[in-house]
Image: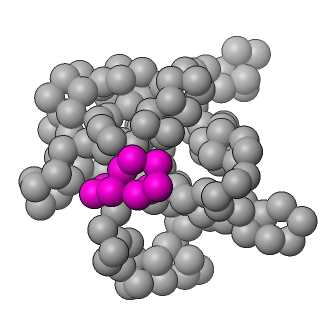
Amino acid sequence: MRESGNPTQWKDWYPPREMVERDVSPDGHGYVCEDGGEVVATFYFNEEQDQTYNYIEGKWQNDEPYGVVHRIAVRRGTKGVGAFCLNWAFDQCHNLRIDTHKDNVPMRKLLDKLGFTYCGTIWVLDGAEERMAFQKIGVAFDDVL
């Protein structure tokens, strides 16, 4: 992130080891994306009510149950992997929320490219850092039939 102009979103301590261990535990919601047996991305996905999204300066597109993506990290030099991960998550729920730091230009561009809508500003739980909040909604194929 530092190399792409976003030096403050993830500090040297984030994500903490305990969070990563919880994500990858059998009860966790951490996922990896592999290419040729090598991990090229990791992210958190779950269909849950995320406390950080309870208050938004702005407006979510709807109040329906939703999925969230957090802590997405893609190996440098890979192409299309972030889009693959976000599209996979969207296919699971068809109502997806995500947030990012204002300086995370690559993620903001990806969200725009994938059809996410900017909804407003949220704050991480300690209230110290604001994030840009996005949502993408769609219709599941089964709902059309």
> In the figure, is residue 82 to the left or right of 16?
right
The relative height of residue 127 versus residue 25 in the rendered view (above or below) is above
Q: For residue 28, say whether it is visible.
A: yes
> In the figure, is residue 131 to the left or right of 44?
left
In the picture, residue 125 is in which quadrant? bottom left
On the image, the x and y values in percent for residue 107 come to: 48, 40
Asked if residue 94 is among those painted magenta in the image, a careful observer would answer: no
Q: Quadrant of the N terminus?
A: bottom left
Q: How is the image coloured?
A: one colour
Asked if residue 5 is among those painted magenta in the image, a careful observer would answer: yes
Residue that lies at the very extreme toward the top in this rendered image:
144
The relative height of residue 115 versus residue 71 in the rendered view (above or below) is above
Q: Residue at x 41, y 84 (%)?
A: 17
Q: Residue at x 43, y 37 (%)?
A: 105
Of the pair 6 and 42, the residue shown nearer to us: 6
On the image, the x and y values in percent for residue 56 come to: 18, 33
Of the pair 21 and 78, the residue shown nearer to us: 78
Residue that lies at the very extreme toward the left in this rendered image:
127
Read off the magenta span.
1-9
On the image, the x and y values in percent for residue 11 come to: 30, 68
Of the pair 107 and 120, the residue shown nearer to us: 107
Q: Residue at x 60, y 42 (%)?
A: 86
Q: Quadrant of the C terminus?
A: top right
Query: Which secondary structure class fits the magenta region best?
Result: loop
Q: For residue 64, say whether it is visible.
A: no
In the picture, residue 94 is in which quadrant? top right
Q: Residue at x 46, y 55 (%)?
A: 3
The relative height of residue 23 versus residue 51 in the rendered view (above or below) is below
> In the figure, is residue 78 to the left or right of 125?
right
